Image: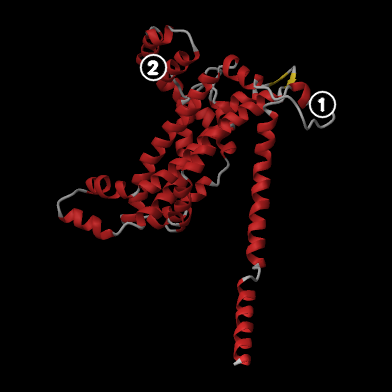
Amino acid sequence: MTALTTSKVQNQAGTSRKKTRIKWKTVGHYALLIVMALIILFPMYMMGITSFKQQVVIMSKEPVWFFAPTVSNYQQILENEHFVRHLISSVYVGIVSTLLTLFISSWAAYAIARMRFPGRGLMANTTLLVRMVPPAVLTVPIFALWGQWENIWFQSPWHTRFIEWVNQTALCMANGDLADAVCQIFADGLMDGRLGLILFYSALNLPFTVWLLVGFIQQIPVDLEEAAIVDGCTPFQVFRKIISPLMRGGYAVAAIFTFRIAWNEFILALILTGRLTYTLPVKTTLFMDEAGVRWGLIMAMGTLILLPPLILTFVSARQIIQGMTAGAVKG
């Protein structure tokens, strides 16, 4: 009896040791994730903490660990640097280019995923190759092309009369950054405006969104479409009533990525916009002048630019993971 009891105690002790054994592979995995998170978060922390420093503290030769925080950098940006005007430009470009991209790419993805036509396989397999072209390489050709199109189209007599009429409206005659920014939308052109930037961003993001949405469409059972066709629906009605409602997750993922690219892009925005239509990333570079680099204003503007996509990413994290692990692995 005593030997049997001793054996049970030993078995229980062995089981407890097995349960408490440290899985070093799991520990290393989470340690690597923590290190990577710190590498990503440290620049954000430095940018945020520097935005609350005065220029004298920032330019100090010795590191200053304790300082009196100030909001003067944010106050100057919001009150003296026409922040509202450039914010409207960024929001307008991001939202319109995102909607235009989603509208075109959804139809293109549906055609690639469901229809049979010559060149379909080649188009499906080479879609992302267009996205691999650096945008900076296309800047000069697009600048020249937009200049030719604007001379032909946007300087026509009817467009000139429209611009004159817009400039005489009460909105454009009112004072303030908000009125100027909204009025400029109606008078936008391809050069020194935001229309050319919107068209280029839409073309730039189309390959990725088409590739992404094809995966989502291929996950939808074909039986649903066949049943709708039997009930008398046309292909357009099938897409509008069956496919689109089931692709909300795909639309969300594509919209997030498209908006973030349009929100953060700098080179094209610098070349294709003017003084009244600068986006926020372009406005940030204007804080480097003959007087020096005003790091406090740059960091404050960078923090304000960072917040919208950061919040959007956290809110839509589930949709992003779904798109990268489900829809994006097919097609």
Q: From mark 1 to mark 2, how far is it between C-alphas? A: 56 Å
User: Is residue 272 toward the left or the right of residue 319 in the image?
Assistant: right
Image quadrant where one finds the N terminus: bottom right
Mark 2 sits on what residue?
156
Could you say which disc has been placed on residue 91 in the image? none
Q: Residue furthest left?
A: 231
Q: Is residue 131 visible?
A: yes
Above-or-below relation of 110 to 174: below
Comparing 208 with 283, the one in front is 283
Residue drawn at (16%, 56%) of the image? 230
Q: Name the residue at 41% across, 44% down.
A: 252
Count the labels in the image: 2
User: In the image, what residue type sits under mark 2?
Assistant: Ser
The residue type indicated by label 1 comes to Ser
User: At 39% from the left edge and 6% from the top edge, which residue is drawn?
Assistant: 168
Q: Position of residue 207 (x, y in %)?
A: 46, 46
Quadrant including the C terminus: bottom left
Q: Position of residue 270 (x, y in %)?
A: 58, 27
Task: Examine the rendering and report whether any part of residue 147 can be seen.
Answer: no
> Measured along the vertical axis of the image, is residue 4 above or below residue 152?
below
The residue positioned 26% from the left and 50% from the top of the image is 242
- Disc 2 is placed on an element classified as loop
Q: Position of residue 160 (x, y in %)?
A: 39, 13
Say if 232 sits above or below 57 in the image. Answer: below
Sequence-wise, which precedes: disc 1 or disc 2?
Answer: 1
Q: Which mark is residue 60?
A: 1
**Relative vertical location of residue 177 with respect to residue 328 in this rendering, above or below:** above
